[in-house]
Image (cartoon, rainbow, N blue to C red):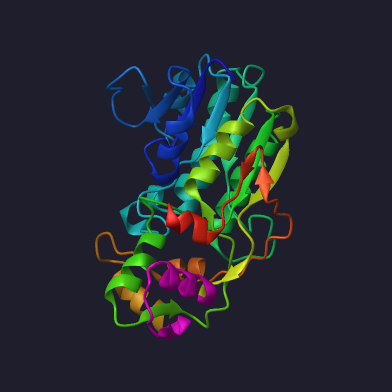
């Protein structure tokens, strides 16, 4: 384990789980706000100068930050509410800060939380383009890296599976966007966080891109599993993607709205992961049923 780790995105859904599993005292969380305790360091992903100080004396960086409201982009609020303006540019800024501070030889590992499908070269999705830009910046930095590409991450505090469980419990039917054939490889957030922490300082993790997820399911199968796990029997109602994108166009302007046209595209994006392992860095990846049952 390295002496000092900088966790970026430690206040987010996934980042909080990573922070819980890191050894206390050997990591700091990057925060936009003034550092309010010993475990935080002030810095802004969109301000290179603030990041120069943040990377001092750091051995390892974990970048798991994402913009507020993900996956609904709100460019009218500023570029920081988009994938390109926050994820891509923010990650590029970290690399710039490391080089400006002349610390690239000091950073022993850069761990980046990318996503499934980031290897698709022919894409119109800003989410994937942003991930590709971020991955390229890291790979060309000269810093040893570990890039994880998880599929759908779920668990307590998420913005997706919790809604599915609510649908199963309280709606007279279970809504499914599209034809129900969208492939997903759900991964329980605790498993993902432990894999990331276990990869720190691992020689076999360096300069690797690793896809993560449980065996492939369709969204129809996910819905059926959620209904089964909640003890409910309800019909699946399929909503055409075009109709949901039209609804999303108007809904995206509502504060904290969970949908937008691009979010619908994100949720129905068809990515097949071919290089999955059932156990990664000592963590056996749970099935969806096992994860929901916890």
Q: Residue at x 29, y 30 (%)?
A: 33
Residue 276 located left or right of residue 91: right
- Residue 111, given in percent of the width and then of the height, sits at 59, 35
| Quarter containing the N terminus | top right
> Furthest residue to the left?
255
Residue 148, quarter of the rendered image: top right
On the question of residue 72 being in view, the answer is: no
Residue 65 in view, yes or no: yes
Decide: is 290 above or below 258: above
- The correct choice, above or below, for 93 with respect to 278 in the image is above
- What residue is shown at x 50% (from left), y 66% (from top)? 266
Q: Judge by depth and name the residue closer to the eye, 185 or 40.
A: 185
Is 136 on the left-hand or right-hand side of 180?
A: right
Question: On the picture, is 274 further left or further right than 241?
Answer: right
Number of marks present in the image shown = 0
Q: In this rendered view, identify the residue nearer to me: 196 or 191.
A: 191
The answer to which of 44 and 268 lies nearer the viewer is 268
Magenta segment includes 165: no
Residue 258 left/right relative to 290:
left
Q: In this view, does 215 lie above or below 107?
A: below
Specify start and end residues of the magenta stretch as a single range.
220-242
Looking at the picture, tell me which residue is in the foreground, 74 or 115: 115
Find residue 186 and report its horizontal and vertical position in percent: 54, 59
Residue 107 pos. (x, y %): 62, 21
Residue 194 lies in quadrant: top right
Residue 139 lies in quadrant: top right
Q: Residue shown at 46%/48% (left/top)?
A: 85
Residue 50 pos. (x, y %)? 41, 25
Residue 229 within the segment the image draws in magenta: yes
């Amino acid at each position: 384990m390295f002496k000092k780790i900088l966790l970026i995105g430690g206040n987010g859904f996934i980042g909080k789980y990573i922070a819980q599993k890191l050894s206390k005292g050997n990591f700091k969380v990057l925060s936009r706000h003034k550092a309010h305790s010993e475990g935080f360091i002030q810095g802004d992903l969109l301000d290179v100068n603030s990041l120069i100080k943040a990377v001092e004396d750091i051995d390892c960086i974990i970048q798991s930050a994402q913009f507020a409201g993900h996956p609904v982009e709100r460019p009218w609020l500023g570029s920081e509410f988009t994938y390109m303006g926050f994820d891509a540019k923010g990650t590029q800024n970290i690399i710039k800060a490391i080089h400006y501070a002349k610390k690239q030889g000091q950073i022993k590992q850069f761990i980046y939380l990318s996503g499934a499908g980031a290897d698709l070269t022919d894409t119109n999705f800003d989410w994937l383009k942003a991930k590709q830009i971020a991955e390229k910046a890291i790979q060309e930095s000269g810093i040893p890296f570990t890039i994880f590409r998880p599929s759908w991450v779920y668990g307590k505090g998420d913005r997706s599976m919790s809604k599915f469980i609510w649908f199963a419990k309280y709606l007279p039917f279970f809504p499914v966007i599209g034809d129900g054939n969208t492939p997903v490889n759900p991964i329980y957030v605790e498993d993902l966080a432990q894999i990331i922490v276990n990869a720190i300082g691992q020689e076999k993790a360096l300069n690797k891109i690793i896809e993560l997820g449980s065996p492939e399911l369709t969204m129809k199968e996910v819905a059926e599993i959620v209904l089964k796990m909640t003890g409910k029997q309800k019909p699946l109602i399929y909503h055409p993607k075009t109709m949901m994108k039209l609804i999303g166009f108007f809904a995206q302007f509502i504060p904290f709205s969970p949908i937008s046209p691009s979010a619908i595209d994100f949720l129905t994006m068809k990515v097949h992961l071919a290089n999955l392992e059932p156990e990664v860095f000592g963590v056996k990846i749970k099935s969806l049923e096992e994860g929901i049952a916890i």
